Amino acid sequence: KFFKETGVWGIMALKKSITIVAPAYNEEQIIEGSIEKLHDFFKKNFNKYKWKIIIAEHDSKDKTVEKAKELIKKLKNVTLISSLNVSKSDAIRNAWLKNKSDIMMYTDIDLSAELYHLKEMIKYLDEGYDIVIGSRNLDKTGIKRDIKREILSGVYNLMIHFLFHVKLTDFQCGFKAMNLKVIDRLAPKMQFMEEGFMDTELLIIAAKKGYKIKEIAVKWKEDIRSTRFNIAKVTIKFFGNLFKMKRAVMRGDYK
C-alpha cells in the first residue's frame, strides 16, 4: 500500500532489466577477477536498471565451478548455470532463455572488450535498435589482435558477404546486446550450435529478417592464452557451417 500511494511502486515497475551472460570454460585463473570487475562496473553505472550477471559454465575440468560458487555467495545479482556436454553457444543460449530480461547481453569472460562500451550499447537499444554488436574492424585504433586471427576473420567476413549478402564487419566479436524480441523469436531457431557459431547464425538471420543492427567500434585486447582452442579446427567447422546454413536458408528453415 505504501509503495502504491507514494508512487514508488510505479517507479520500480518502470525499471528496465538487463541480463549479461559470461560463458566460462576452464577459467579458474581469471573468473574471480573478471566477474568482480564486471559486477563493480554494473553496480556503479546501471543503478537505474534491474540487472544480473549469469556465469554460463560448460563442462569445465578445473576449479571454475568452485570459484563461481564462491563468487555468488559474496556478490549480489550473480548467478551460476552449469551445463554438461554443451558448446559455448549452447551455454549462452540456455542462460538467455532461462533468465529473460528487457536487454540481453553477453561478453567473453576475459573482458577483451572495454566495459565502458556497454553503456553505448544500451543507449542504441533504447533508441530503437534490436541488436548492438561490438566490432574490431570499424576502427583499428586500440585493437590488439593476433595477425593470424585477423586474416582468418577477414576471409570469413568475405565468405559471409558472398553467401548471404549481409555486410556487417565483425560477426564473431564476443560482445553483443539485443532486446528480448530477438531472444524470443530467433534464439530458439538456431541450428548450428558448435563452439561460438551462434553469433554468426543469429546475425545473418536477424539481418535477413529486417531487424535493426548497430555496430560500434570497440577497444579490444585479444585473449591469446594457449589453452583456448585450435584456431584451424574451429575455422574449418565454421566455414562448413556457413554452407550448411546456406542450404537451410534456401529450404526456408528459418521461416
Image (cartoon, grey):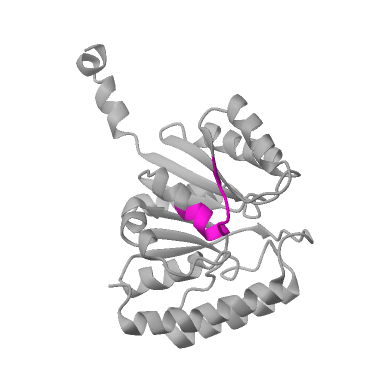
Q: Is residue 45 left or right of residue 190?
A: right
Whether residue 26 is visible, yes or no, is yes
Closer to us: 245 or 180: 245
Q: Horizontal placement of 144 versus 162: left or right?
A: right
- Looking at the image, the residue that sits furthest to the front is 85
In the image, residue 89 lies in the stretch drawn in magenta: yes
Q: Residue at x 73, y 76 (%)?
A: 148
Q: Is residue 76 magenta?
A: no
Which residue is more in the foreground, 195 or 86? 86
Q: Quadrant of the N terminus?
A: top left
Q: Position of residue 208 (x, y in %)?
A: 34, 75
Residue 151 appears in which quarter of the rendering?
A: bottom right
On screen, residue 246 above or below 209: below
Comparing 70 with 131, the one in front is 70
| Residue appearing at x 63%, y 76% in the figure | 235
Q: Which residue is outermost to the top?
A: 2
| Closer to us: 144 or 165 | 165
Q: Write the residue at 54% across / 84% down.
A: 158
Expressed as whole percent of the image width and height from the top left, the position of residue 72 reads 58, 30
The answer to whether any part of residue 165 appears in the image is: no
Residue at 67% x, 49% y: name it.
60
Residue 16: percent from left, percent from top: 35, 38
Depicted 19 relative to depicted 71: above or below: below
Q: How many marks?
A: 0
Residue 255, image x and y in percent? 27, 72
* Segment tinted magenta in the rendering: 81-93
In this view, the residue farthest toward the right is 226
